[in-house]
Image (cartoon, rainbow, N blue to C red):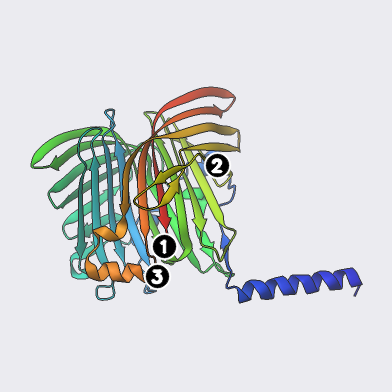
Amino acid sequence: MPKRIHRMLIVFLLVAVAAAAAGVVRVQGFGAGSQDEATLNAGLPAAEYGYHPDEDGSWGESWSVQCVNEAGDNIVALMSISNYHPLHKFGGTVDLFYYPASGEKFEGHAEVKNDNVSANRNGVKVNIGGNRFSGNHPNYRWQTEVEGLALDLTFTAETPSLQLGQRKILFGDRGDRYWNLTVLGPRASVKGTITANGRKIPYEGRAYFDHGWSTYKLYEFSQRWHVLRMMQDDFSFNLIEMVFRENFRPKRTQAIYITLGDKIIANSGAVKLTPTGAYKHAPSGLTLPQSYRLHYEAGGTKLTGTVRMVKLVEGLNALDRLSPLLRKVIQTLVTDPWQFRFAGEADLTLVHNGQTRKITGLTGGEVHHYK
C-alpha cells in the first residue's frame, strides 16, 4: 500500500475513533431537493397527516396552528401527545395563546391523561380532553377551550400539503431516529371566533398549520431554533433553522418553503439564514437577533432580503406552564426551555420564472432556546 494512502487511512481511523469517543451523533439534515413543480405540488398521503405512536420513550407528536389578521392579532395554538410523562404515557397537552395587536394577551394550558386522548392514524382527527382538530385536505376545524380561552376556527388550505425540506432530519449512523414536519396548510385562510374574558370575538385572516413528530426527545438534540414566517393573500414563506447540541455534526440545518398563488414554488434546504444585531433579554439572560438576512436560490426561484424584529410579543420559560410532576420530568432533560415570539417587518425581493416582485409587510418569528 502506498505510504500516502496508508497515512490517510490512519488519519481517517483516528478521526473516527475520536468521534466515537466524544459521542458524536451524525445528522442528515435537509438537502436541496427537487424543485420540479409537479414534485413540489404532489401533496402528501393521508397517513402523513395522522397519528404515529411509537413505544420508544422518546416519542412525541403535535398539531399546531398560527394565525394573523389584518389588525395584527395573532393566534398560536398547539395540541401534543407524548411519552414524556412518567405516569401517563400517550398523555396530551393543549396550549393556547391569543395576542391582540394592543392590550393584554390571553393564554391557557391543559394536561390530559391518556384515557381521554385519541387520534386517527390515517388522517387528522385529534381529541385531547374534548379539544378537537379534524378535517380532510383542504378543509379543517380547530375547537379548543382551556382556562376561559376558546377557539373555534375553520381553515381552508390554499396549496397542497408538504413535508418541510422534502425529508426527515435523521440522527445516528443508521439514521434510525428522526424529526419530521408535515405542513398541512402551507398557506390557508381562517375564519371563526375567539372567546376571551367571556366575550366572543369574530376572527378572519391568514393561517399556517402543521403536524410534527419525532422519535428523539426535542430537548436532547435541539439547542436553538429560529423560525421566520410570512403570510399574505397570495404569497407566503416559512423558514426554520435548527441548531443542534454540541455533540451533533453537522451543527445546524435549515429549510424554507415558498408559496405563490395556489402553488408551492420552493421547498428546500438550499437557504442561508444570517442573524444580525443583538438584543439582550434580561429575564432569561439570553441574546436574541434584532434582524435576519435570508438568501434562497434554486430551481429558477430566488428570495433575498431582511426581516427585522419590531416587537417582542412573548418571552416565556416553558417550565412555568407545566404541572409540578411534568416540570420535574422535563427538567431532567433541559434546565431552561425559553420560547420567544416576535412581530417583524420584511423587506424582500422574489424572483420567480424571470419575474421580479418586491415583498414587504408584517412577519412573525420565533426563537426557541434550550439550555
Mark 1 or 2, closer to the camera? 2
Q: Name the residue under label 1.
A: 218
For the point 29% across and 28% down, which residue is it?
A: 70
Front residue of 299/344: it is 344
- Marks 2/3 in contact by CB < 8 Å: the verdict is no
Q: In the rendering, which numbered label is found on residue 274?
A: 2
Question: Spatial distance from mark 2 to mark 3, Cα to Cα?
Answer: 31 Å
Q: Mark 3 points at which residue?
A: 58
Label 3 crowd bin: few (<14), some (14–19), many (20+), radius 10 Å: some
For the point 20% across and 39% down, which residue is it?
A: 104
Mark 2 or 3, closer to the camera? 2
Front residue of 122/179: it is 179
Q: Quadrant for residue 317, please give it.
A: bottom left
Label 2 crowd bin: few (<14), some (14–19), many (20+), radius 10 Å: few
- Label 2: which secondary element: strand
Q: Locate residue 273, reporting x and y percent.
A: 54, 42
- Label 3: which secondary element: loop
For residue 295, above or below residue 58: above
Q: N-terminal of the two: label 2 or label 3?
A: 3
Q: Which amino acid does label 2 sit on?
A: Thr
